Image (tube, rainbow, N blue to C red):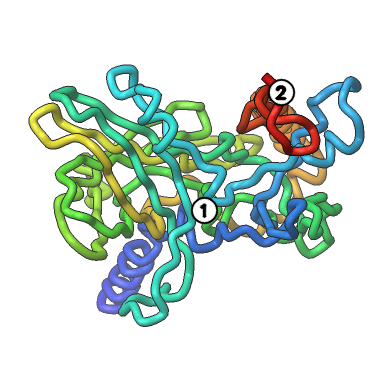
Amino acid sequence: MKKTLCLFAAAMLLVGGAAFAEESMLIDFTLLDADCVANENGDNTQNRHTVMDYSVTAGATFTNDQKDLMRTSLVLSDWEVTLNSSAKTVAALADSKVVAAPVKESADVPFAGKNVMGVRIVFPSWNSNSNAKVIPAFEIPAYEPLSDADDSGNRQEPTDEQKASGKTLFEDGYGVVKNVGTIKSIQVTTMGMNHPHGLYVLLKDNDGVERRYFMGYLGFDGWKELRWNNPQYLTEIRSREIRVYPIYPRGLPFVKFTGFQITRDAAQAGGDFIGYFKDVKIIYDKALLTSDRDIADEDLWGIITTKEKARQNFEMSRFGEKQVNRYLEKAKLAAEDEFTSSLKSDNGGQASE
Protein backbone atom coordinates (compact mmCIF):
# COMPACT_ATOMS: atom_id res chain seq x y z
CA MET A 1 0.00 0.00 0.00
CA LYS A 2 2.83 2.36 0.91
CA LYS A 3 4.61 1.60 -2.38
CA THR A 4 1.42 2.36 -4.31
CA LEU A 5 1.04 5.72 -2.59
CA CYS A 6 4.66 6.62 -3.40
CA LEU A 7 4.16 5.72 -7.06
CA PHE A 8 0.96 7.75 -7.17
CA ALA A 9 2.70 10.77 -5.65
CA ALA A 10 5.57 10.49 -8.13
CA ALA A 11 3.11 10.29 -11.02
CA MET A 12 1.31 13.40 -9.81
CA LEU A 13 4.63 15.26 -9.64
CA LEU A 14 5.41 14.24 -13.21
CA VAL A 15 1.99 15.37 -14.41
CA GLY A 16 2.39 18.66 -12.57
CA GLY A 17 5.84 19.18 -14.07
CA ALA A 18 4.58 18.49 -17.59
CA ALA A 19 1.76 21.00 -17.23
CA PHE A 20 3.90 23.50 -15.35
CA ALA A 21 4.75 25.63 -18.38
CA GLU A 22 3.19 26.05 -21.79
CA GLU A 23 4.82 27.17 -25.05
CA SER A 24 2.91 29.40 -27.47
CA MET A 25 3.68 31.34 -30.60
CA LEU A 26 3.07 34.99 -29.74
CA ILE A 27 3.56 36.37 -33.26
CA ASP A 28 4.76 34.78 -36.49
CA PHE A 29 5.65 37.33 -39.15
CA THR A 30 5.46 34.74 -41.95
CA LEU A 31 1.66 34.79 -41.45
CA LEU A 32 1.35 38.49 -42.27
CA ASP A 33 1.51 38.47 -46.08
CA ALA A 34 -0.68 40.82 -48.14
CA ASP A 35 -3.50 38.64 -49.49
CA CYS A 36 -6.63 40.85 -49.72
CA VAL A 37 -7.89 44.40 -50.42
CA ALA A 38 -6.48 45.06 -53.89
CA ASN A 39 -5.47 48.60 -54.90
CA GLU A 40 -6.07 50.28 -58.25
CA ASN A 41 -3.22 48.24 -59.75
CA GLY A 42 -4.74 44.95 -58.61
CA ASP A 43 -2.04 44.36 -55.97
CA ASN A 44 -3.12 43.06 -52.55
CA THR A 45 -2.34 45.51 -49.78
CA GLN A 46 -3.68 43.98 -46.56
CA ASN A 47 -3.50 40.77 -44.56
CA ARG A 48 -6.80 38.88 -44.66
CA HIS A 49 -6.68 37.37 -41.16
CA THR A 50 -5.86 40.63 -39.36
CA VAL A 51 -7.61 43.24 -41.53
CA MET A 52 -9.64 45.78 -39.55
CA ASP A 53 -12.24 48.31 -40.70
CA TYR A 54 -11.91 51.64 -38.90
CA SER A 55 -14.59 53.46 -40.90
CA VAL A 56 -17.02 52.76 -38.04
CA THR A 57 -15.43 55.69 -36.17
CA ALA A 58 -15.03 57.96 -39.20
CA GLY A 59 -18.34 59.81 -38.87
CA ALA A 60 -20.92 60.78 -41.45
CA THR A 61 -18.80 63.34 -43.33
CA PHE A 62 -17.03 60.64 -45.35
CA THR A 63 -18.48 59.09 -48.49
CA ASN A 64 -18.97 55.35 -48.83
CA ASP A 65 -16.08 55.21 -51.32
CA GLN A 66 -13.80 56.86 -48.78
CA LYS A 67 -14.95 54.52 -46.04
CA ASP A 68 -14.23 51.53 -48.28
CA LEU A 69 -10.58 52.61 -48.26
CA MET A 70 -10.38 52.68 -44.47
CA ARG A 71 -8.85 49.27 -43.99
CA THR A 72 -5.63 48.36 -42.23
CA SER A 73 -4.05 45.19 -40.87
CA LEU A 74 -0.85 43.71 -39.49
CA VAL A 75 0.56 43.37 -43.01
CA LEU A 76 4.30 43.97 -42.68
CA SER A 77 4.38 47.06 -44.89
CA ASP A 78 1.98 48.83 -42.47
CA TRP A 79 4.28 48.47 -39.45
CA GLU A 80 6.04 51.63 -38.33
CA VAL A 81 9.43 52.71 -37.01
CA THR A 82 9.26 55.39 -34.31
CA LEU A 83 12.52 57.12 -33.32
CA ASN A 84 13.36 58.78 -30.04
CA SER A 85 13.88 62.56 -30.02
CA SER A 86 17.67 62.44 -30.39
CA ALA A 87 17.37 60.23 -33.49
CA LYS A 88 14.61 62.14 -35.30
CA THR A 89 15.86 63.75 -38.47
CA VAL A 90 14.05 64.29 -41.75
CA ALA A 91 16.22 61.67 -43.49
CA ALA A 92 15.78 59.15 -40.67
CA LEU A 93 12.01 59.55 -40.60
CA ALA A 94 11.81 59.16 -44.38
CA ASP A 95 14.08 56.11 -44.73
CA SER A 96 13.31 54.11 -41.57
CA LYS A 97 10.67 51.53 -42.48
CA VAL A 98 9.44 47.92 -42.33
CA VAL A 99 9.09 45.68 -45.39
CA ALA A 100 8.26 42.05 -46.20
CA ALA A 101 11.63 40.33 -46.74
CA PRO A 102 11.47 37.11 -48.82
CA VAL A 103 13.71 34.27 -47.64
CA LYS A 104 15.40 32.36 -50.47
CA GLU A 105 14.01 28.94 -51.34
CA SER A 106 17.54 27.57 -50.99
CA ALA A 107 17.91 28.82 -47.40
CA ASP A 108 18.57 26.11 -44.82
CA VAL A 109 15.68 27.12 -42.54
CA PRO A 110 12.14 25.67 -42.16
CA PHE A 111 10.59 28.95 -43.37
CA ALA A 112 12.54 29.11 -46.65
CA GLY A 113 10.48 30.74 -49.40
CA LYS A 114 8.34 32.76 -46.96
CA ASN A 115 8.37 36.44 -46.04
CA VAL A 116 9.80 37.64 -42.73
CA MET A 117 9.91 41.13 -41.24
CA GLY A 118 12.69 43.30 -42.64
CA VAL A 119 13.55 46.49 -40.72
CA ARG A 120 15.66 49.49 -41.73
CA ILE A 121 16.46 52.12 -39.10
CA VAL A 122 18.62 55.18 -39.77
CA PHE A 123 20.41 56.08 -36.54
CA PRO A 124 22.33 59.36 -36.12
CA SER A 125 25.91 59.33 -37.45
CA TRP A 126 27.13 61.39 -34.49
CA ASN A 127 27.71 60.13 -30.95
CA SER A 128 24.28 59.86 -29.42
CA ASN A 129 22.40 57.32 -27.35
CA SER A 130 19.38 56.58 -29.50
CA ASN A 131 16.67 53.98 -29.94
CA ALA A 132 13.79 53.06 -32.21
CA LYS A 133 10.60 51.07 -31.78
CA VAL A 134 9.10 48.81 -34.42
CA ILE A 135 5.35 48.81 -33.81
CA PRO A 136 2.20 47.67 -35.64
CA ALA A 137 -0.09 50.18 -37.33
CA PHE A 138 -2.53 49.78 -34.44
CA GLU A 139 -2.43 48.26 -30.98
CA ILE A 140 -3.37 44.62 -31.39
CA PRO A 141 -6.88 44.08 -29.96
CA ALA A 142 -7.14 41.34 -27.34
CA TYR A 143 -10.91 40.85 -27.57
CA GLU A 144 -11.70 40.96 -31.30
CA PRO A 145 -14.01 38.01 -32.16
CA LEU A 146 -12.60 35.31 -34.41
CA SER A 147 -14.07 35.61 -37.90
CA ASP A 148 -13.16 35.49 -41.59
CA ALA A 149 -12.73 38.37 -44.03
CA ASP A 150 -13.56 38.51 -47.73
CA ASP A 151 -11.30 39.71 -50.55
CA SER A 152 -12.29 43.32 -49.87
CA GLY A 153 -11.43 43.11 -46.17
CA ASN A 154 -15.01 43.02 -44.92
CA ARG A 155 -15.39 41.03 -41.70
CA GLN A 156 -17.97 38.24 -41.80
CA GLU A 157 -20.15 37.03 -38.95
CA PRO A 158 -18.38 34.41 -36.79
CA THR A 159 -19.39 30.85 -37.62
CA ASP A 160 -20.70 28.46 -34.98
CA GLU A 161 -17.38 26.64 -35.08
CA GLN A 162 -15.44 29.85 -34.50
CA LYS A 163 -17.69 30.81 -31.59
CA ALA A 164 -17.30 27.37 -30.04
CA SER A 165 -13.49 27.57 -30.25
CA GLY A 166 -13.42 30.27 -27.58
CA LYS A 167 -10.52 31.97 -29.38
CA THR A 168 -10.16 35.57 -30.46
CA LEU A 169 -8.91 36.92 -33.78
CA PHE A 170 -5.30 37.67 -32.86
CA GLU A 171 -4.44 34.43 -31.06
CA ASP A 172 -2.38 31.58 -32.57
CA GLY A 173 0.56 33.60 -33.85
CA TYR A 174 -1.05 36.96 -34.55
CA GLY A 175 0.04 38.83 -31.42
CA VAL A 176 -2.03 37.67 -28.43
CA VAL A 177 -1.69 34.75 -26.00
CA LYS A 178 -4.44 34.15 -23.43
CA ASN A 179 -4.37 32.49 -20.00
CA VAL A 180 -0.83 33.68 -19.22
CA GLY A 181 0.39 33.62 -15.64
CA THR A 182 4.13 33.99 -14.99
CA ILE A 183 6.32 34.22 -18.09
CA LYS A 184 9.25 31.83 -17.86
CA SER A 185 11.06 32.54 -21.14
CA ILE A 186 10.81 34.59 -24.34
CA GLN A 187 12.50 33.69 -27.61
CA VAL A 188 13.01 35.73 -30.80
CA THR A 189 14.12 34.20 -34.11
CA THR A 190 16.19 36.86 -35.85
CA MET A 191 18.88 37.25 -38.48
CA GLY A 192 21.84 39.31 -37.32
CA MET A 193 23.93 41.54 -39.56
CA ASN A 194 26.80 42.19 -37.12
CA HIS A 195 25.18 45.36 -35.79
CA PRO A 196 26.18 45.85 -32.11
CA HIS A 197 22.75 47.14 -31.09
CA GLY A 198 20.54 45.82 -28.30
CA LEU A 199 17.15 44.19 -28.86
CA TYR A 200 14.13 44.38 -26.56
CA VAL A 201 10.71 42.72 -26.87
CA LEU A 202 7.75 44.86 -25.75
CA LEU A 203 4.71 43.12 -24.21
CA LYS A 204 1.53 44.50 -22.64
CA ASP A 205 -0.67 42.62 -20.17
CA ASN A 206 -4.40 42.68 -19.42
CA ASP A 207 -3.89 45.54 -16.94
CA GLY A 208 -2.48 47.74 -19.71
CA VAL A 209 1.07 47.62 -18.29
CA GLU A 210 3.79 47.49 -20.95
CA ARG A 211 7.10 45.85 -20.09
CA ARG A 212 10.27 45.42 -22.11
CA TYR A 213 12.52 42.36 -22.05
CA PHE A 214 16.18 42.50 -23.07
CA MET A 215 16.91 39.73 -25.56
CA GLY A 216 20.60 40.45 -26.17
CA TYR A 217 22.80 42.12 -28.76
CA LEU A 218 22.55 41.71 -32.52
CA GLY A 219 26.31 41.60 -33.17
CA PHE A 220 26.28 38.27 -35.01
CA ASP A 221 25.85 37.03 -38.57
CA GLY A 222 23.07 34.67 -39.68
CA TRP A 223 19.95 33.27 -38.05
CA LYS A 224 19.88 32.93 -34.28
CA GLU A 225 17.33 32.38 -31.52
CA LEU A 226 17.77 34.98 -28.79
CA ARG A 227 16.28 33.98 -25.45
CA TRP A 228 15.31 35.83 -22.28
CA ASN A 229 14.94 33.74 -19.11
CA ASN A 230 13.01 35.11 -16.16
CA PRO A 231 15.58 35.41 -13.33
CA GLN A 232 12.77 35.43 -10.75
CA TYR A 233 11.04 32.30 -12.00
CA LEU A 234 10.76 29.67 -9.25
CA THR A 235 10.48 26.03 -10.25
CA GLU A 236 10.10 24.87 -6.66
CA ILE A 237 6.42 25.09 -5.78
CA ARG A 238 7.10 25.22 -2.05
CA SER A 239 9.11 28.42 -2.55
CA ARG A 240 6.31 30.19 -4.37
CA GLU A 241 3.74 32.49 -2.89
CA ILE A 242 0.49 30.67 -3.58
CA ARG A 243 -2.34 32.92 -4.73
CA VAL A 244 -5.90 31.72 -5.20
CA TYR A 245 -8.09 33.70 -7.60
CA PRO A 246 -11.85 33.44 -8.08
CA ILE A 247 -12.55 31.19 -11.07
CA TYR A 248 -15.55 33.21 -12.20
CA PRO A 249 -16.04 36.00 -13.28
CA ARG A 250 -12.33 36.82 -13.49
CA GLY A 251 -11.36 36.97 -17.18
CA LEU A 252 -8.33 35.18 -18.56
CA PRO A 253 -5.08 37.16 -18.19
CA PHE A 254 -3.23 37.70 -21.46
CA VAL A 255 -0.15 39.26 -23.02
CA LYS A 256 0.03 40.95 -26.39
CA PHE A 257 2.94 41.92 -28.59
CA THR A 258 3.43 45.68 -28.85
CA GLY A 259 6.71 45.77 -30.76
CA PHE A 260 10.49 45.61 -30.75
CA GLN A 261 12.91 48.21 -29.46
CA ILE A 262 16.42 48.51 -30.89
CA THR A 263 18.93 50.55 -28.91
CA ARG A 264 22.16 52.10 -30.18
CA ASP A 265 24.92 53.14 -27.77
CA ALA A 266 26.67 56.47 -28.42
CA ALA A 267 30.02 54.67 -28.52
CA GLN A 268 28.89 52.48 -31.44
CA ALA A 269 28.78 53.43 -35.10
CA GLY A 270 25.51 54.98 -36.27
CA GLY A 271 23.93 55.08 -39.69
CA ASP A 272 21.78 52.36 -41.24
CA PHE A 273 20.66 49.35 -39.20
CA ILE A 274 19.19 46.37 -41.05
CA GLY A 275 17.52 43.48 -39.23
CA TYR A 276 15.21 40.55 -39.97
CA PHE A 277 12.72 38.90 -37.61
CA LYS A 278 10.77 35.67 -38.06
CA ASP A 279 8.78 35.17 -34.82
CA VAL A 280 8.42 35.64 -31.06
CA LYS A 281 7.54 32.74 -28.72
CA ILE A 282 6.87 32.56 -24.99
CA ILE A 283 6.94 29.83 -22.35
CA TYR A 284 4.63 30.60 -19.45
CA ASP A 285 2.63 29.23 -16.55
CA LYS A 286 -1.10 28.98 -17.10
CA ALA A 287 -3.02 31.49 -15.05
CA LEU A 288 -6.03 29.17 -14.71
CA LEU A 289 -6.57 25.48 -15.33
CA THR A 290 -9.29 25.08 -17.93
CA SER A 291 -11.74 22.25 -17.30
CA ASP A 292 -15.34 21.34 -17.95
CA ARG A 293 -17.66 22.52 -15.21
CA ASP A 294 -21.06 21.25 -14.20
CA ILE A 295 -22.68 24.65 -14.80
CA ALA A 296 -22.02 26.92 -17.81
CA ASP A 297 -21.31 30.02 -15.72
CA GLU A 298 -20.87 32.44 -18.64
CA ASP A 299 -24.02 31.27 -20.43
CA LEU A 300 -25.95 31.92 -17.21
CA TRP A 301 -24.46 35.26 -16.11
CA GLY A 302 -22.71 36.76 -19.16
CA ILE A 303 -20.40 38.88 -17.01
CA ILE A 304 -17.17 38.22 -18.94
CA THR A 305 -18.90 38.76 -22.30
CA THR A 306 -20.18 42.16 -21.16
CA LYS A 307 -16.76 43.24 -19.85
CA GLU A 308 -14.91 42.02 -22.93
CA LYS A 309 -17.40 43.71 -25.26
CA ALA A 310 -16.89 47.03 -23.48
CA ARG A 311 -13.11 46.68 -23.68
CA GLN A 312 -13.30 45.68 -27.33
CA ASN A 313 -15.39 48.79 -28.15
CA PHE A 314 -12.86 50.98 -26.34
CA GLU A 315 -9.93 49.43 -28.23
CA MET A 316 -11.72 49.84 -31.58
CA SER A 317 -12.59 53.47 -30.84
CA ARG A 318 -9.02 54.39 -29.89
CA PHE A 319 -7.57 52.53 -32.85
CA GLY A 320 -10.15 53.95 -35.25
CA GLU A 321 -9.62 57.60 -34.29
CA LYS A 322 -5.88 57.28 -34.92
CA GLN A 323 -6.40 55.63 -38.30
CA VAL A 324 -8.99 58.20 -39.42
CA ASN A 325 -6.59 61.03 -38.58
CA ARG A 326 -3.91 59.32 -40.64
CA TYR A 327 -6.34 58.91 -43.51
CA LEU A 328 -7.14 62.63 -43.41
CA GLU A 329 -3.46 63.54 -43.33
CA LYS A 330 -2.75 61.25 -46.28
CA ALA A 331 -5.57 62.87 -48.25
CA LYS A 332 -3.88 66.27 -47.76
CA LEU A 333 -0.58 65.18 -49.32
CA ALA A 334 0.50 67.05 -52.43
CA ALA A 335 -0.18 64.89 -55.48
CA GLU A 336 1.99 66.92 -57.88
CA ASP A 337 5.64 66.04 -58.44
CA GLU A 338 6.47 68.69 -61.04
CA PHE A 339 5.61 72.34 -61.59
CA THR A 340 3.60 73.41 -64.61
CA SER A 341 6.09 74.92 -67.03
CA SER A 342 5.82 78.64 -67.74
CA LEU A 343 8.17 78.28 -70.72
CA LYS A 344 6.08 75.87 -72.75
CA SER A 345 2.75 76.48 -74.41
CA ASP A 346 -0.13 74.02 -74.30
CA ASN A 347 0.84 72.63 -77.73
CA GLY A 348 4.36 71.86 -76.54
CA GLY A 349 6.10 74.71 -78.37
CA GLN A 350 8.30 77.41 -76.88
CA ALA A 351 6.47 80.40 -75.48
CA SER A 352 7.13 83.67 -77.27
CA GLU A 353 9.54 86.11 -75.68
Q: SS at mark 2?
A: loop
Q: Is residue 204 left or right of residue 67?
A: left
The residue that appears at 64% across and 46% down in the rendered structure is 73
Marks 2, 1: nearer the viewer? 2
The image position of residue 278, as x and y in percent, is 40, 60
Q: Amino acid at mark 2?
A: Ser
Residue 263 sits above or below residue 35 on the image: above
Most extreme residue toward the bottom is: 106
| Total labels drawn | 2
Q: In which quadrant of the rendered view does residue 291 lie?
A: bottom right
Q: CA distance from mark 2 to mark 1?
A: 86 Å
The residue that appears at 8% across and 30% down in the rendered structure is 267
**Residue 244 visible to the viewer:** no
Q: SS at mark 1?
A: loop
Q: Nearer the viewer, residue 222 or 96?
A: 96
Q: Amino acid at mark 1?
A: Leu
Q: Nearer the viewer, residue 293 or 182?
A: 182
Q: Which numbered circle lies on residue 289?
A: 1
The residue that appears at 30% across and 24% down in the rendered structure is 87
Mark 2 and mark 1 residues within 8 Å of each other at the beta carbon: no
For disc 1, the neighbor class at 10 Å (few under 14, some 14 to 19, many from 20) is few
Q: Which numbered circle lies on residue 352?
A: 2
Q: On the rendered image, what quadrant is the N terminus found in? A: bottom left
